[in-house]
Image: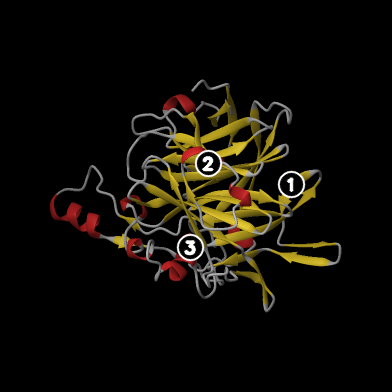
Amino acid sequence: MPVERTVRLHFEESARAAGTHTNLSAVRGDGAALWVAGDETATVERLLADDPGEPRRFAQQASFHLADYVPLPAVSPDEDDAREEADIEGLARHGLFLWAVGSHSLRRRQIKAKHTGEKAFRRLARVSGQRNRQLLLRFPVTAVDGVPTIVRELDLDGVHHRAASFGAHGTDLRELLAADEHLGPFLPLPGKDNGLDVEGIAVAGPRVYLGLRGPVLRGWAMVLELRPEVDPDAPDQLRLPRFDDGRRYRKHVLNLQGLGIRDLCPHGDDLLVLAGPTMELDGPVHVFRWHGALRADQPQVVRDDVLTRELSLPYGEGDDHAEGIGLVGAADLLVVYDSPSPARLTDDGDVLADVVRLP
């Protein structure tokens, strides 16, 4: 796959110190702006293009701390600096809102070079979760000085819109899936062990699609479809109404050749699906097109002509893991990488993303 060009993403010192630029997990275009997130903080970053028509560099970073707009359940409201990690793995932009989703995954401690013997085994046995990871978030966006900006509240045409979340109060997605015949057995497993791991979001009208990196079931990856709406009794909270079968979510399974989902991106009535390994592996990495995804009105078994492989993306050895895709223009796809190789990092604080042309 030829890379058409590279684009520089410039981050300020605060974001570089937090490692955001080397842990990019989500990206979404918004006109001349680019929304990005890393999985090691609880922020969303906004970058602005040097040329909206054919951007070569995004800079003028602005950080939006999630805790300034919605409560984070793992942090006490009395704390002055509620900035704990939220593991944001997907961003979506639709209508008045920017959406963000956490991984919802458990994590297993790593064995590092300094760990040996019994301590290494103890670390490998330790599994933990964090409530901040188990959130679906929706933020109003409005133009401030001509630039898309997250706000806590927005009044438009007599309708009041507030930042809202699902999972911060009461039931969260993991609890809803606990009794699921396909996903329930995998909830005790960490995400990198083929456990539940949300790594992509796409929004179209009332539909919210969540792509799962794991579990992959006998080679089939899964997309969850939700229809979140504002809780009339709590306007800062979202609730999930039931589908016709009584469930609050709908499942679709995709034949991605044994790969899990790393990101989702709407393109017309289709969904572009970034697919890569579920486990700690370097590749392969492909972009598939799920034709007609946004018109599906029943659970889908997605294969054959409905699912076509559009692109194969580069990957490194221990680095350059494609984690996010977003459209720039009608047919150009911007790809951002987690664990970027040294060749992607510049001396002046930029990180290089790739632009590829869709077939």
**Which residue, given by chain and number where applicable, does mark 2 sit on?**
306
Query: If you read the primary sequence from the N terminus, does the residue marked by circle 3 or circle 2 appear first?
Result: 3
Q: Residue at x 13, y 51 (%)?
A: 117
Task: Give the spatial CA distance, label 1 vs label 2.
Answer: 35 Å
**Which mark is nearer the camera, 1 or 2?**
2
In the figure, is residue 57 to the left or right of 76? right
- Split into 4 quadrants, where in the image is the C terminus? top right
**Which mark is nearer the camera, 3 or 1?**
3
Closest to the observer, 80 or 40? 40
What number is the disc on residue 134? Answer: 3
Residue 21 appearing in the image? no
What number is the disc on residue 148? Answer: 1
Q: Could you classify mark 2 by the number of other residues whose Cα lies within 10 Å: few (under 14), some (14-19), or many (20 or more)?
A: some
| Circle 1 SS class | strand
Q: Looking at the picture, does residue 222 appear above or below residue 7?
A: below
Give the residue furthest to the right: 157
**Which mark is nearer the camera, 3 or 2?**
2
| Circle 2 SS class | helix
Image coordinates of residue 188 in percent, x first then y, are: 32, 64
- Identified by mark 1, the residue type is Pro
Task: Give the spatial CA distance, label 3 vs label 2.
Answer: 31 Å
Q: Could you classify mark 3 by the number of other residues whose Cα lies within 10 Å: few (under 14), some (14-19), or many (20 or more)?
A: many
In the figure, is residue 18 to the left or right of 96? left
Q: Residue at x 62, y 54 (%)?
A: 99
- Identified by mark 3, the residue type is Gln
Task: Give the spatial CA distance, label 3 vs label 1.
Answer: 26 Å
Q: CB atoms at circles 3 and 1 under 8 Å apart?
A: no
Closest to the observer, 186 or 255? 255
